[in-house]
Image (cartoon, grey):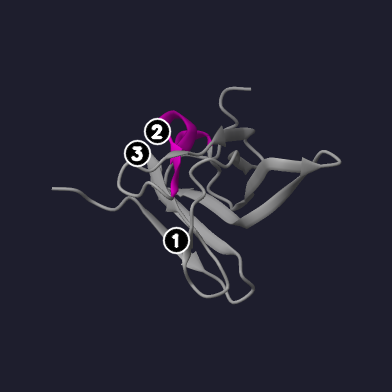
Amino acid sequence: MSMANHTVTDNPDGTSTIAVHGRGSLAIDYKEQDDDGNQIDISGQQLFFEVDGPPIRIQLVADPSDPKGQLIKLTRTLVEKLKKTPSNWTVIDETDMEDDMPVVTWNGTISRTGYVGEPDTDGGN
């Protein structure tokens, strides 16, 4: 049996809030659509997921269930580094960076749930 260990809530301002349980990993499918609602093939794009606070930067990986999409995947070790208080995150596209400026394609806040009795840590630093 599989259990969802995270929630993604879309906010009215276009950002999203991610809450992930501290005992699990995280896998969120990432897709983009054109103005007509058709899915765009982003399989060859250089996309990264970055979190402020605990320094996390990972490249998105191929989505085995959708050849046009990618996945945001955080290991359990990375999830444990997340704070219980929300940190800002972004998905950035570094495929065609003009003037070394990446394009933000999605953003919001992320926090860790679970381990209620434990304080936030900075990964031992």
Is 97 or 30 nearer to us in this picture? 97
Extent of the magenta region: 69-81
In the rendered structure, which disc, 3 or 1, sits on the residue that comes first in sequence?
Answer: 1
* Direction right: furthest residue: 99
Residue 82's place in the image compared with 34, above or below, is: above
Q: Is residue 72 magenta?
A: yes
The kind of residue on which mark 2 rests is Arg
Q: Is residue 3 magenta?
A: no
Q: What SS does tag 3 mark?
A: loop
In the rendered structure, which disc, 3 or 2, sits on the residue that comes first in sequence?
Answer: 3
Residue 63's place in the image compared with 125, above or below, is: below
- On the question of residue 50 being in view, the answer is yes
The kind of residue on which mark 1 rests is Val
* Residue identifier under label 1: 8
Q: Which mark is residue 76?
A: 2
Spatial CA distance of label 3 from label 1 is: 17 Å
Q: Position of residue 111 (x, y in %)?
A: 52, 50
